Image: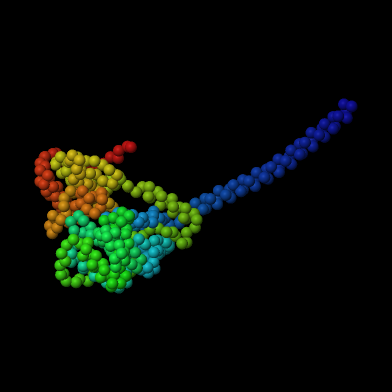
């Protein structure tokens, strides 16, 4: 029995070794195949990365376009939406006509689809002749009642003192005039109007008239007389019809602002990359006054420091909010700093009407709620404007009976961000 078992066991051992050799060979082939696939994938990725690196980087113009959202309807009356776009001379704006709401910009051979956010001025410039005629006639009439014009992004307002009596707006092909009249007092009259008092920006001028004919112009003149609270003067008729300009010219002149809609030729990956770039850029945009001041150039910081020292010499104390740095005594605010774009402004509690026709270059911001108590806006762009602001602060101090204290000049150019 023992002599028979031995050959069988020996044969069994030999057979098992052969099987093992075959299995090892099979697994080796499979491993080589897997390794080849891995190498191929790595090479492919490297090639794609090299190709991406070789592609031209996006220009600043493209990045700006990608970062820009569609405009909101409730932008402030003061300046409207910020575009953040400065097109280079090489950028080509394809003019799609004055009625188009969107168009194309070509930057470095790449087509970018953009939307147009037209200012009131741009809409008027590109309006048809009848609309321009209606506008000119009504503007002349408002001037005859002593109303003064003030232009914002979406409207042209007419005011006297701190009260707004009328506003123009253009939507599509229709000119509208908004008047400071109570719509309920004109119910069941010959006048065709709508009550827009529920819209914040038209709360002071709730009666809206659409001007589409000479008859509508005549009716609007009658209502301007009712709203103006003043005697009419016989002034010479002036021509306020602006000459037509194409869309490309108005974009260059910053009367039309662009926002990004898309790249018609972009792949899905390019669109995803564009979204990431836009989000990152928006996330870096300064929102509060302190951050804007930190990122401002040295000239703005120097002007800010000089005026801040002067305000302190009259005993004013500062209080920081998100968008402004306010200066007050007791419970009254007498001045506010603001930064918009690359411009530092100081708003003061002075009546702009008292300084009409003087050397000072200012704007009356009394119609903007947050500047109602400090309506006189001075843009600080030079050493001369700093001197003017100091003179106006002194005038305000004289009216209030404040005395100036000779405090040592401090350096407020370097601002530290406070941890929240």
On the image, the x and y values in percent for residue 282 come to: 37, 50
Quadrant hosting residue 315: top left
Residue 294, image x and y in percent? Answer: 28, 44
All told, the count of numbered labels is 0
Please provide percent x and percent y for residue 83. 33, 56
In this orientation, which residue lies closer to the viewer: 338 or 57? 338
Is residue 149 visible to the viewer in this orientation of the structure? Answer: no
Q: Relative to residue 380, is residue 243 depicted above or below?
A: below
Measuring from the top left, give residue 204's x and y in whole percent. Answer: 26, 56
90 left or right, relative to 165: right
Q: Residue at x 57, y 49 (%)?
A: 41
Q: Quadrant of the C terminus?
A: top left
Q: Residue at x 69, y 42 (%)?
A: 27
Residue extending furthest right? Answer: 1
Q: Is residue 239 above or below residue 80?
A: below
Q: Is residue 335 visible?
A: yes
Residue at the top extreme, as displayed: 2
Quarter occupied by residue 109: bottom left
Q: Quarter of the image holding residue 228?
A: bottom left
**Model colouring:** rainbow
Instruction: Give whichever of 93, 75 is nearer the camera.
Output: 75
Compared across the picture, whether 352 is left or right of 263 comes to left
- Residue pictured at 22% horizontal, 53% vertical: 366
Instruction: Tell whether 263 sits left or right of 418.
Output: right
Q: Quadrant of the N terminus?
A: top right
Residue at 79 percent across and 35 percent down: it is: 14
């Amino acid at each position: 029995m023992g002599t028979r078992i031995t050959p069988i066991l020996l044969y069994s051992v030999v057979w098992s070794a052969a099987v093992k050799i075959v299995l090892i060979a099979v697994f080796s082939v499979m491993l080589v195949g897997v390794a080849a696939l891995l190498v191929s994938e790595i090479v492919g990725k490297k090639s794609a990365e090299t190709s991406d690196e070789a592609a031209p980087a996006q220009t600043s113009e493209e990045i700006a376009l990608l970062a820009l959202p569609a405009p909101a309807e409730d932008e402030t009356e003061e300046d409207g939406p910020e575009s953040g776009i400065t097109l280079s001379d090489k950028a080509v704006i394809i003019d799609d006509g004055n009625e188009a709401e969107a168009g194309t910009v070509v930057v470095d051979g790449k087509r970018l689809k953009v939307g147009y956010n037209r200012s009131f001025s741009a809409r008027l410039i590109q309006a048809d002749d009848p609309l321009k005629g209606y506008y000119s006639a009504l503007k002349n009439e408002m001037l005859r009642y002593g109303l003064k014009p003030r232009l914002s992004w979406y409207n042209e307002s007419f005011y006297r003192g701190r009260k707004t009596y009328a506003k123009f707006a253009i939507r599509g092909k229709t000119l509208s005039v908004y008047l400071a009249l109570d719509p309920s007092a004109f119910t069941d009259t010959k006048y065709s109007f709508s009550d827009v008092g529920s819209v914040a920006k038209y709360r002071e001028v709730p009666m809206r008239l659409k001007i589409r004919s000479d008859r509508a112009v005549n009716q609007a003149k009658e209502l301007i007389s009712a709203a103006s609270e003043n005697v009419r003067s016989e002034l010479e008729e002036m021509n306020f019809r602006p000459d037509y300009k194409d869309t490309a010219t108005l974009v260059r002149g910053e009367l039309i602002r662009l926002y990004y809609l898309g790249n018609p030729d972009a792949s899905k990956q390019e669109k995803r990359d564009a979204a990431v770039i836009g989000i990152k850029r928006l996330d870096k945009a300064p929102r509060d006054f302190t951050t804007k001041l930190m990122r401002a150039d040295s000239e703005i910081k120097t002007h800010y420091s000089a005026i801040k020292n002067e305000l302190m010499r009259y005993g004013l104390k500062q209080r920081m909010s998100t968008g402004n740095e306010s200066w007050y005594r007791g419970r009254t605010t007498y001045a506010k700093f603001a930064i918009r774009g690359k411009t530092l402004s100081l708003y003061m509690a002075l009546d702009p009407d008292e300084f009409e026709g003087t050397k000072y270059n200012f704007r009356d911001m009394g119609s903007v709620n947050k500047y109602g108590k400090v309506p006189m806006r001075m843009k600080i762009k030079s050493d001369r404007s700093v001197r003017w602001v100091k003179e106006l602060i002194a005038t305000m101090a004289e009216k209030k009976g404040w005395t100036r204290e000779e405090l040592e000049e401090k350096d407020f150019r370097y601002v530290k961000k406070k941890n929240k």
